[in-house]
């Protein structure tokens, strides 16, 4: 950094504002300027340099392109205030449209509501008193738009939609539980976290998703790898982080239509007979809720230092 500044002071420099571009640079052609326009041009440049660009792209005569992040030019962002930071916990599905049915004939909505309430309790205990539980009524598709409208009206800082996983119908096998016909699939297990590239703040959504997935992995949990496999057909999705299990899904209304950063957590598989038992246990529920709380606290710390956000 010191060397770059020294060279910057001695060599000719071309400075241009750069937006969020894939190559991080956006150059403008040079034009000859008449003496009459020199003063106005210098004033215009000064005004541009005072504006807050995301990056400064510098072309040093001897060193070539160098990118300095905005965070290197100003102090790191302040942490949020837990007392005013609002997280909306969206309970997946409704009492009228219960989602998947577990291997032991329990509706997904029951699992979702129980875990969401526990996460709400944990976040409030950690000082995030503005946490809101979002319960929606109605049939499947209409309820999706209802929950998006409700979340937007709450002016939340983050939204987290809570679900429990199953598999496509073609993968289900038959069995009986307590004398009732049911279905199961022990082929896959694990959590997964989804974001949408169509969310108005995809970058922040991805950051939060990676924190949640990272905390769950740190607790010894593994992510569901099947969503990256061709066998999933139309349910196959791009894996954005192969280390922690963050996927992209641009079809989820609750992720792409909300005004705030949003993620969807599939906490675990309830169609897998062994994992269903684990998801039903207080130990696993506490493990997940503490992972989410840790991720929110980390999210609220300064999110970038001198080298910018990860």
Image (cartoon, grey):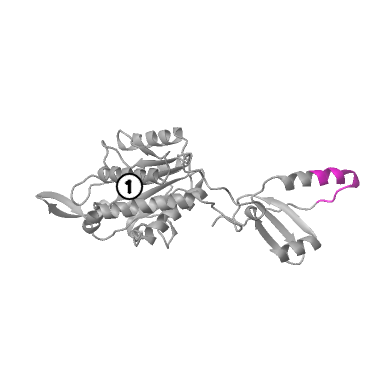
Please indicate, yes or no, whether residue 253 appears anywhere in the rendered image: no
- Relative placement, left or right, of 76 versus 275 is right
Q: Where in the figure is residue 253, as x and y percent of width and height?
A: 41, 41
Quarter of the view holding residue 242: bottom left
The magenta stretch spans residue 36: yes
Residue position marked by numbered label 1 in the rendering: 163
Instruction: Label 1: state its secondary structure.
Output: strand
Q: Where in the figure is residue 210, as x and y percent of width and height?
A: 45, 55
User: Which residue is located at x 52 percent, y 50 percent?
Assistant: 203
Q: From which residue to which does the magenta span run? A: 31-43
Quarter of the view holding residue 240: bottom left
In the displayed structure, 67 sits above or below 51; it is below
Work out which residue is located at the far left of the displayed protein and give it: 179
Quadrant holding the N terminus = bottom right
In the displayed structure, 181 sits above or below 139; it is below
Question: Considering depth in this image, is 169 or 290 the residue closer to the camera?
Answer: 290
Question: Considering depth in this image, is 200 or 122 the residue closer to the camera?
Answer: 122
In the displayed structure, 207 sits above or below 91; it is below
Quadrant holding the C terminus = bottom right
User: Which residue is located at x 65 percent, y 56 percent?
Assistant: 72
- Relative placement, left or right, of 90 versus 206 is left
Which SS type dominates the magenta stretch? helix
Q: Where in the figure is residue 120, as x and y percent of width and height?
A: 36, 43
Please indicate, yes or no, whether residue 139 appears anywhere in the rendered image: yes
User: Which residue is located at x 63 percent, y 51 percent?
Assistant: 75
């Amino acid at each position: 950094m010191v060397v770059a500044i020294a060279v910057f002071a001695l060599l000719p420099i071309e400075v241009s504002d750069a937006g969020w571009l894939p190559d991080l640079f956006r150059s403008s052609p040079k034009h000859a300027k008449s003496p009459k326009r020199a003063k106005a041009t210098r004033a215009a440049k000064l005004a541009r340099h005072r504006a807050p660009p995301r990056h400064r792209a510098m072309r040093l005569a001897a060193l070539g392109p160098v990118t300095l992040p905005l965070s290197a030019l100003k102090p790191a962002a302040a942490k949020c205030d837990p007392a005013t930071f609002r997280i909306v916990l969206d309970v997946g599905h409704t009492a009228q449209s219960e989602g998947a049915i577990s291997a032991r004939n329990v509706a997904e909505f029951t699992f979702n509501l129980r875990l969401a309430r526990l996460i709400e309790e944990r976040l409030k205990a950690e000082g995030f008193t503005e946490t809101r539980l979002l319960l929606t009524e109605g049939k499947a598709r209409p309820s999706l738009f209802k929950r998006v409208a409700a979340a937007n009206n709450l002016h939340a800082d983050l939204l987290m939609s809570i679900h429990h996983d199953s598999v496509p119908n073609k993968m289900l096998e038959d069995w009986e539980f307590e004398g009732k016909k049911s279905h199961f699939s022990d082929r896959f297990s694990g959590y997964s976290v989804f974001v949408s590239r169509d969310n108005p703040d995809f970058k922040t959504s991805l950051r939060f998703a990676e924190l949640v997935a990272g905390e769950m992995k740190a607790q010894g949990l593994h992510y569901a790898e099947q969503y990256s496999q061709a066998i999933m057909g139309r349910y196959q999705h791009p894996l954005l982080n192969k280390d922690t299990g963050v996927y992209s899904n641009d079809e989820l209304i609750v992720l792409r239509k909300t005004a705030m950063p949003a993620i969807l957590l599939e906490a675990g598989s309830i169609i897998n007979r062994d994992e269903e038992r684990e998801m039903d246990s207080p130990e696993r529920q506490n493990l997940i809720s503490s992972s989410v709380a840790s991720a929110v606290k980390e999210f609220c710390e300064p999110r970038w230092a001198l080298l910018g956000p990860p």
